[in-house]
Image (spheres, helix red, strand yellow):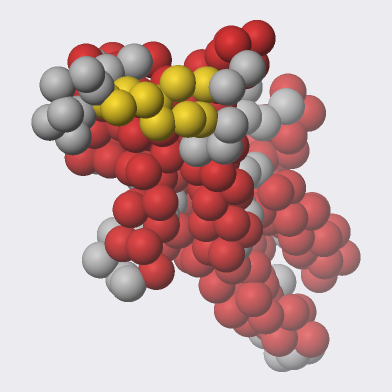
């Protein structure tokens, strides 16, 4: 996931594109009312496209059911209080900038940020424990194998939550990977790799130690690190 400053920087630049090239046209009644109009009418389709991009951005990063997403859709559809299409697009930019200020002040948060921070902790803390277990010749490799499975299961759950997907009724590494495959967030091969890791973890959990060696645990550590790296690359 992009870091917070990258997300906020993009929001600012998107808001800027929604406010450039617009000219204020005062109303005829002298009551302070008026509307925004684009100086080059041929640029109107691009402005409208950027307005939709702004609304989609808020859906992803502020949340589909958030006030910010619904407010952006409302001001655009109402053409900025029945002024003009350009006024509605510019108002979407205002919503974006206000959301940015709220995030910077700590009042609002980027959707999925906490879940993605969990993935980072898993990659460093849990896999660090795996490395220490494998380095300890007195410890059976089953412990490292079980921990690898737990790390992946936690990371997949964080990914599902960050994407706003509904968790399976029976949470497990297998059901998580099946859900992510259906959503086409992971490849067929990655789903197979996850099933393989899950199979080893289950063998360890059920005491089938004869199948498990330190070498196999080391390979599982490598595979788990690769899968965790892939999960961390899946942006919102």
**Residue 88 % position (x, y):** 34, 24
- 60 shown above or below 231: above
Query: Does residue 234 show up?
Result: yes
Q: Nearer the viewer, residue 118 or 125?
A: 118
Query: Does residue 70 show up?
Result: no
Q: Quadrant of residue 73?
A: top left
**Residue 18 % position (x, y):** 51, 34
Q: Is residue 164 left or right of residue 7?
A: left
- 164 shown above or below 179: below
- 219 shown above or below 25: below
Q: Is residue 157 left or right of residue 126?
A: left
Q: Quadrant of the C terminus?
A: top right
- For the point 18% across and 34% down, the residue is 32
**Residue 114 % position (x, y):** 41, 62
**Residue 76 % position (x, y):** 32, 21
- For the point 22% across and 18% down, the residue is 28
Q: Nearer the viewer, residue 6 or 30?
A: 30
Q: Nearer the viewer, residue 49 or 186?
A: 49
Q: Is residue 178 left or right of residue 110?
A: right
In this rendering, the count of numbered labels is: 0
- For the point 25% across and 66% down, the residue is 107
- 76 shown above or below 165: above
């Amino acid at each position: 996931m992009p870091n917070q400053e990258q997300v906020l920087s993009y929001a600012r630049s998107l808001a800027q594109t929604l406010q450039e090239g617009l000219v204020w046209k005062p109303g005829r009644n002298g009551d302070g009312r008026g509307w925004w109009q684009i100086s080059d009418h041929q640029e109107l389709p691009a402005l409208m496209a950027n307005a939709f991009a702004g609304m989609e951005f808020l859906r992803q990063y502020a949340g589909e059911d958030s006030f910010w997403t619904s407010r952006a859709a409302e001001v655009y559809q109402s053409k900025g209080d029945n002024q003009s299409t350009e006024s509605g697009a510019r108002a979407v930019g205002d919503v974006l900038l206000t959301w940015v200020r709220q995030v910077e002040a700590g009042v609002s948060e980027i959707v999925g940020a906490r879940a993605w921070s969990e993935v980072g902790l898993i990659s460093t803390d849990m896999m660090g424990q795996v490395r220490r277990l494998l380095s300890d010749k007195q410890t059976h490799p089953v412990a490292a194998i079980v921990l690898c499975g737990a790390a992946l299961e936690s990371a997949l759950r964080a990914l599902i939550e960050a994407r706003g997907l509904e968790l399976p009724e029976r949470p497990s590494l297998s059901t998580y990977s099946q859900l992510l495959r259906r959503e086409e967030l992971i490849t067929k091969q990655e789903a197979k790799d996850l099933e393989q890791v899950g199979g080893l973890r289950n063998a360890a959990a059920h005491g089938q130690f004869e199948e498990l060696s330190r070498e196999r645990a080391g390979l599982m550590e490598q595979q788990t690190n690769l899968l965790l790296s892939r999960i961390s690359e899946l942006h919102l």
